[in-house]
Image: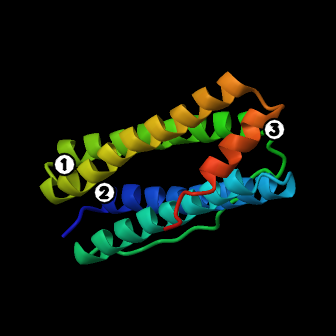
Amino acid sequence: MISRTMQDALNAQINLEQYSAQLYLAMSAHCAGKSFKGFAQWLKVQSAEETAHAAKLVTFLLDRGGQLELKPIAAPNDDFGGIIKVFEQTLAHEKTITGRINALFELARAEKDYASEITLQWYVTEQVEEEAHVGEVVDHLHAVGDQGGAIWYLDSKMGKRGKA
């Protein structure tokens, strides 16, 4: 059985993962509206990943006898600026998520909730990957700028994410 404190914390994270999915879907639409179909595809795949992260936590919560408590999800901003700004915001958001995951992990340790700690280890590792991947995109965008042919090359490269 999961503690009420851990249940509440996991529910908050589930709702945050769902917000992340909405945020990245809104960013995807923003990029598509600027004819950056590749960046839009990358963000759409990211949105789906965030939904999967939430679903994995839901399964874990229910398997432990917890109760799911979904909350209304705030609509994300719809004006993200240029492509560089979109991905800078994405990186900042991922860093926020990392902080939240780390806090959950610490809570699991404090409660000696080993099952939660083991499950959350996957999320800790995933956040290292998320920040590294988005950080690389930001670095590439800073290197090429948001004008000229190089950004369109990056756009085509980014569009391959999630495709066979």
Q: Nearer the viewer, mark 2 or mark 3?
A: 3
Residue at image mark 3: 82
Q: Left of 13 or right of it: where is 43?
A: right
Position in image of residue 64 (x %, y %): 22, 72
Position in image of residue 105 (x %, y %): 28, 44
Q: Amino acid at mark 1?
A: Glu
For the residues marked 2 and 1, what is the alpha-carbon distance in whole angstroms?
A: 8 Å
Of helix, strand and loop, which one carries label 1? loop
Q: Amino acid at mark 3?
A: Gly
- Asked if marks 2 and 1 touch (Cβ < 8 Å), the reply is yes
Position in image of residue 138 (x %, y %): 61, 32
In this rendering, the answer to whether 139 lies above or below 28 is: above
For the residues marked 3 and 1, what is the alpha-carbon distance in whole angstroms?
A: 44 Å
Residue at image mark 1: 111
Q: Left of 57 or right of it: where is 42?
A: right
Label number found at residue 6:
2
Please report whichever mark, 2 or 1, sits nearer to the chain's N-terminal start. 2
